[in-house]
Amino acid sequence: MSAREAILARVRKAAGGAEGREAAVAARLAGNGPHAPRPAQARSEGAARLELFEAKARAADATVARIATVADLPAALAAELRARNLPATVRTGADPLFVGLDWGAVERTEGVGRLEEPATLSRAEFGLAETGTLALASGPMNPVTLTFLGETHFVALPTADVMAGFEDFWAAWRARGLDPRTLNFVTGPSRSADIGQTLQLGAHGPVALHIFLIG
Amino acid sequence: MTGPAPKPRVALFVTCLVDLFRPRVGFAAVKLLEEAGCTVEVPEGQSCCGQPAYNSGDRETAKRVARTAIEAFEGYDWVVAPSGSCAAMVAKDYPELFRDDPAWLPRAEALAGRTREIVSFLTDVLGVERVAATLETTATYHDSCSGLRSLGVKAQPRRLLASVDGLTLTEMTDPEVCCGFGGTFCVKFSDISTKMVGDKTGNIAATGADLVLAGDMGCLMNMAGKLSREGRPQKARHVVEVLAGMADGPAIGEGA
Amino acid sequence: MTAHQPTSRQFKKNVTAALANENLQRAMRSTQSGFVGKRAKARDALPEFDSLRDAARDLKNHTLAHLDLYLERYETEVKASGGHVHWAETAGDARRIVLDICRAAGAKTVNKGKTMISEEIGLNAHLEENGVRAVETDLGEYIIQLRGEAPSHIIAPAVHVTVPEVDALFRKTHAHLPADRDLSELPTMLAEARAVLRQKYFEADVGVTGANMLIAETGQSVIVTNEGNGDLSQSLPRVHIVLASIEKIVPTLEDAATVLRVLARSATGQEMSVYTTFSRGPRRAEDPDGPEEYHVVLLDNGRTGMLGTEFQDMLRCIRCGACMNHCPVYQAVGGHAYGWVYPGPMGAVLTPSLIGVEEGGQLPNASTFCGRCESVCPMRIPLPKMMRHWREREFEKHLAPAASRYGLRFWGFFAARPALYRRATGLAARALAALGRGRGRFAALPLAGGWTRSRDFPTPAPKTFMQQWKER
């Protein structure tokens, strides 16, 4: 008997011959299982939702700026790079949101993350207001390495894509038909408390996370 | 025409450590119960709740001892113990102990439903809101684990202590952290127990209180023994001694 | 296997060493309040927290009752995404599978995200013995790997190491850097580790990570980290291997969210950890990055033996570490004293399950049953109850010391006969009372050395309550 068969046989034996097991599993996988309580903080609406998203992202040590339209992104990014004493260059994916813009003084290169990446820019598919979390989908539009190799990680997020919490997020995610290799939830910049049990930002991933909320 | 409600008939579950080391706690419990309008009896047939065996993995012996307790305490309105640990054993663990014993399970469950820890019995069942006691001192209260986590005893003793004239209650750091007694744990793993009780007495001393109170003799003997070994001035008493106005005379572990 | 051999049998010896280790005691003191306070704050900020714990418990119970079906669905989904699923019955099987994948990939270096399963199967030593270099990338794991140690905490592996120790370690290990460099500030130390490890991500041929969850519906593996090392370990090398035990399965994406809502809050007090990554299969044709091969090793290693027993509830564990953060015994002795991979209350239940009660039997005895672990467990695992079940098994197997076994039976004989019991205990108490008359306490007592070495023992009352009650 293969290891697979042996393990599954032991699991089946422990489960006993209870009736309706297949039906219970099918129901759960079809989304008809019991629903866990939906926290009040995952129910925000409208302007309050955006405020909550911003507040939670800041509580997780991200910085957030609102810009009116995507056309304002290059100038806003250029100002942020200057303010952070970073060179006027940024690494991005091939997201159509970025491709059509006039980047002016910022030198934008496309591709995967490299050993040294002072600044990277990604686009988040969604935001989750309940925890100030970004949801990024990997692919040619958003190479996953940009999320982890950038010393400073910039993320663009249209306000229309800010969800209240996991419930409406998963519904929207499924509705958008997304199936990337990785779905990356990001809540603030990287951190570690492994040296002296003191929390420090910038462990292996970005030292800083800056979110442009568009719209 | 209705007469006054009949007095609840309460069996006092004395518990081993109170019986042998601190009879005054038993008398304080009787006094509080009688003042709250109960008829108190002390059933002859009682011995131990069975925890030493239960917690050592000896289920059979635990059951044998538990059956004795079930028989001793049948027929009372309530069974009340001056110990969160012994009360929790009866109220929470007896049904689990007899889960596969159809003959004894109903009796175990019936007893479990009628068994209470004394302070929470006074407040939650009898509606006692204050006591008529005076004690000019500063005390700190240690939450014994079983009472706190199995029975939800936390606010009740503090509420009644707040009504004691002259008494100031000062909270210690980590009042909910175990003192390291743990029944046989304190001798089987005496090094760890010593570290735990040392942390506890440090927290007690840091409050500057004169007195540490708790609802379980095991914890109290452990803390009192460490306080006196460390030469600290703090004394230890069972909470009901204070509530019953019987906090005179030697404290736990103090010479006569 | 030359991985860390269990020393759980000599728990008491380990305890003595731990209590005498000043560095360890200092490190434990500095963390004790941190985790507890942060969890409490996170719980208080989410009114639904306790009902989410109920939901998380229920979803795991449902999953365990249907585990075979969910495992099959999970496997189908992984394969559909182009990944490989390997089933491992034992630690040895899992080690062999990982080594085979590394050899087929021609791997010289393996980068590792934090995985407790890797510790459980002793992977690093096995790879090294076979000429493959394993590099831990989680900062804490990196530190203890350099020290040649096992983790002492499941989410904060180097919690026992002090800052001066890290300073000395980095100076010794990073010998290519100037010897007189200034490491006095914590950020400098972190930057140095970051720079050294950043290079290694690009050199590794294989990346190994654990999994916080496996999602049956989609075939995704989920890792939850704060540093970002797990993602770099799984994104940059050509091959990604996920090490996961079979009970990590949850049915759906929504179920994963329920677990996430209690996980970080219980572990570090964060609402969400910084990085939560759902991965499905190898890179697609259009993907510019990500691994070309994706393997999952599904490990049993004793877990199916827990299903259907009084220890099944333990398989709900999501490895948040809240039980050890709140355990006064763990806080007193640290994780290494437990002698194997999993410390604290969860380790005290799991260790005898996975490596045998003969080896791990001391651990479930080393508890006061204070219940603080159960009170904070996000999956509501009745840890004290399961420790008691281990004691019962030991008692049945006659593993408990004979003196204690007969003592209990002897005591039980009296305790079941109240009149006799009262006479016997009363007599003993009276003898002791006479001995200690007027002093109130004993500084030393025969047979009670465990108590009186560090504490005075109160003198019994001259007359028991029962005697006085009768006479009143």
Image (spheres, grey):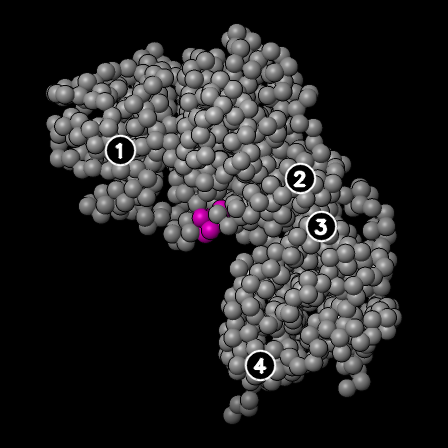
Q: Amino acid at mark 2?
A: Ala
Mark 2 on the same chain as mark 3 = no
Q: CA distance from mark 3 to mark 4?
A: 36 Å
Residue carrying label 2: C337
Q: Chain of mark 1?
A: A
- For residue B191, the mark is 3
Q: Quadrant of residue A160?
A: top left
Residue C36 among magenta residues? yes
Residue C75's place in the image compared with C428, above or below, is: above
Q: Are marks 3 and 4 on the same chain?
A: yes
Which residue: 56% across, 70% down?
Answer: B209
- The residue sitting at 36% across, 17% down in the picture is A115
Q: Confirm whether circles 1 and 3 share one chain.
A: no
Q: Residues within 10 Å of mark 1 (few under 14, many from 20)?
A: many
Q: Which residue is mark 4?
A: B135
The residue drawn where x is 80% and y is 56% is: C449
Q: Amino acid at mark 1?
A: His
Dot 1 and dot 2 residues touching (CB under 8 Å):
no
- Tell me: C80 left or right of C91: left
At label 4, the amino acid type is Leu
Left or right placement of residue A57 versus residue C168 in this view: left
Residue that label 1 marks: A210
Mark-to-mark CA distance, 1 and 3: 51 Å
Callout 3: chain: B
Q: C318 or B143: which is nearer to us?
A: B143
x and y, in percent, of residue C354 in the image: 66, 33
Q: Chain of mark 2?
A: C
Range drawn in magenta:
C35-40
